[in-house]
Image (spheres, rainbow, N blue to C red):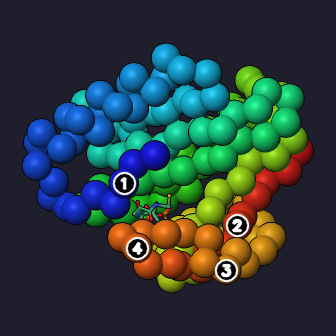
Amino acid sequence: MIPEVKYPCKLSIAKNILNDLIEENKRDGKENFIIDIDKQAVGAIGLTKIIKGHKAEIWSWLGEKYRRKEIITKAHKLISDYAFKKYKLKRIYGNLLTKNIGSAKMLEKSGFKKEALLKKNAKINGKFYDEFIYAKLK
Ligand SMILES: CC(C)(COP(=O)(O)OP(=O)(O)OC[C@H]1O[C@@H](n2cnc3c(N)ncnc32)[C@H](O)[C@@H]1OP(=O)(O)O)[C@@H](O)C(=O)NCCC(=O)NCCS
């Protein structure tokens, strides 16, 4: 999973993140994709905790310059359609901090539905945050 990335980030950090995503693709249960625009890696989207025939978690990240152009909404639709077919899934889900209004809107536009509020589900730098869980079912 991509950590919170500051924009612009150092080239060395970007390279490490890309290498980690490529390495993860060699393992079962994960599949990552780079979002490429004009041969530039501008974001990423991935599936994790894949359980074939059942479920997977989806996550995404897009560079600030490319946001609010529906790129991620389209990527979520594309990757979830792909994952439902390839892994014969019944459920794709994603967690997000309750304050992440952009992600919530984007998931709703991609066909995901809010299921629940998860109190203190995320721990970031020693602090606890509430999250929503969104899911798309087949
Ligand atoms: C969240 C994120 C993926 C959204 O990407 P995006 O490219 O802006 O999304 P889209 O352009 O597809 O927008 C989808 C909808 O969300 C809205 N939206 C996006 N960011 C928003 C924000 N910060 N505040 C309010 N609405 C927002 C868009 O306006 C659009 O709705 P509209 O068509 O009604 O206007 C992107 O901001 C991001 O990468 N953030 C950092 C990482 C992150 O939070 N990842 C998700 C958790 S793993």
What is the C-alpha distance between the residues marked 1 and 4? 15 Å
What is the C-alpha distance between the residues marked 3 and 4? 15 Å
**N-term mark: 1 or 4:** 1
What is the C-alpha distance between the residues marked 1 and 3? 21 Å
Q: Are marks 1 and 4 in contact (CB under 8 Å)?
A: no
Question: With 136 as the anchor, is 62 left or right in this view?
Answer: left
Q: Amino acid at mark 2?
A: Ile
Counting from the top left corner in percent of width and height, residue 75 is at 54, 45
**Looking at the image, which residue sits at the far top?**
26
Q: Quadrant of the C terminus?
A: top right
Marks 3 and 4: which is nearer the front? 4
Describe the element under mark 1 as helix, strand or loop.
loop
How crowded is the residue under tag 2: few (<14 C-alpha within 10 Å), some, or many (20+)? some
What is the C-alpha distance between the residues marked 2 and 4? 21 Å
Q: Which residue is mark 3?
A: 119
Q: Which residue is mark 2?
A: 133
Residue visible at 66% across and 38% down in the picture: 49
Q: Amino acid at mark 1?
A: Pro
Question: With 128 as the anchor, is 10 left or right in this view?
Answer: left
**N-term mark: 3 or 4:** 3
Counting from the top left corner in percent of width and height, residue 24 is at 46, 27
Counting from the top left corner in percent of width and height, residue 34 is at 39, 35
Q: Is residue 104 visible?
A: no
Closer to us: 127 or 41: 127
- Residue 80: name its quadrant: top right
Question: With 34 as the anchor, is 76 left or right in this view?
Answer: right
Marks 1 and 4: which is nearer the front? 4
